[in-house]
Image: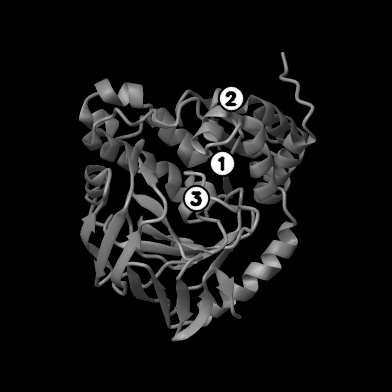
Amino acid sequence: MAVLSGDPRIAEYARLIVDRSLDVQPGWQVLIRSNPPARPLLEELVRLIARRGAYPVLMIGSTMWPVDPVWAASAPDELVGELPGIDRYAVDHMDARITLDAPENTRNESELPVEKQALARSARWPFYQRTVSMEIPWVGCHFPCPALAQEAGMATSEFEDFLYGAVLRDWDEETRRMTRYAERFTRAETVRVVGPGTDVTMSAAGREAIVDEGRLNLPGGEFFFCPVEDSAEGEVSFSEFPTEQGGTVVEGIRLVFRDGRVVEASARRGEQALVEALDTDEGSRSLGELGIGCNEGITRHLNNTLFDEKMAGTVHFAIGAGYPFAGGLNVSALHWDIVKDLRSGGRVECDGEVVQENGVWLI
């Protein structure tokens, strides 16, 4: 029986994903990984994909396929670190993918030992390889379910309004606005981020700033680039917001970069999870990305990185993998976005020119 919903925003959201984010073509196999609470949106997606003459391939579970933490907790390590052949086949043959997060519990992985979490990250990496290289179109998004609303400290109806306000925007106009800022970063040789406990300089030479215009992620609303791999120097303090790694809350992170790598790391809470993530593999201590949040529909921290990294007036440092399509060379199973608020006493410089101060653009 179909799940009935009178909210027209669900259908609009589905059209945005299928028509704009992916532009699904006839005959495509569109892999959708999601959770049961997203069923109203899932049904709209399936319907629209069908009308385009394509196949939806549904991977639905209580956690996000392809590695289930209940299984991973009891399975031998050599299995946890590798995808089974049938899942590798799906990864290798999908024509597009949708990651639609609607968890029943946002802490499903928190009881998994950190060693197993590192193995699971390695196993998941093949799922992302073809999308990180932009070989196929993809989109990551959320459905406004009770667990995400609770995590954000909102009633479900309040979270619905917040989510749709961030997602259902005039993306053509948003693209024009962000492109103007991104072009300044593409021209830059060096970028510097300064704020409380923070002063980091990195090279952007030869690296294009990419605008997330509501295609790769929903909500979109950022631009980002991959710093030259050995260039990040300085210290950053993420004192404003908590973050999460493998179901563990991590707060008060401080990182020191030398020659592009994290050489010192501490956290007020969750330090073990921080260090274990940084030790995932050889590339996990490198700075893979610097992103600049521009979405003015996101006005507060939700403890949800997909939203928080787009908040206007913030930047985010991604530890680990870079994006090959943006010129990034660093390879890692880790890509961890950590958000820094610059709206009170922070600034961003390009080649010594202050381009943003206290979250306000000056160009």
State the quadrant of the C terminus. bottom right
Q: Position of residue 84 (x, y in %)?
A: 36, 29
Packing grade of label 3 (10 A; few <14, some 14-19, many >=20) is some
Q: Nearer the viewer, residue 300 or 106?
A: 300
Q: Position of residue 324 (x, y in %)?
A: 44, 62
The Cα atoms of the two marked residues, 3 and 1, are separated by 8 Å
**Measured from the top left, where is residue 270 in percent x and y?**
27, 43
Give the label, 3 or 2, closer to the camera: 2
Up-down relation of residue 344 to residue 335 (above or below): below
Sooner in the amino-acid sequence: mark 3 or mark 2: 2
Q: Do the numbered discs 1 and 2 sit on residues whose CB atoms are within 8 Å?
A: no
Q: Name the residue: 33% across, 22% down.
A: 71
The amino acid type, in three-letter code, at marker 1 is Arg
For the residue marked with disc 3, what is the amino acid?
Thr
Pointer 1: what residue? 97
The numbered mark at residue 37 is: 2
Which amino acid, mark 2?
Pro
* The N terminus, quarter of image: top right
Residue 130 in the image: above or below residue 346: above
Mark 3 and mark 2 in contact? Answer it, CB < 8 Å. no
How many C-alpha atoms fall within 10 Å of the one at disc 2: few (<14), some, or many (≥20)?
some
- Does any portion of residue 213 appear in the rendered image? yes
Element assignment for label 1: strand
**Label 3 residue SS:** helix
Residue positioned most to the front: 344
Q: Is residue 66 left or right of residue 45?
A: left
- Numbered mark located on residue 131 in the image: 3
Measure how far apart labels 3 and 2 are at the Cα level.
25 Å
Q: For the residues labelled 3 and 1, say whether their Cβ atoms are less than 8 Å apart.
A: yes
Snapshot quadrant of residue 83: top left
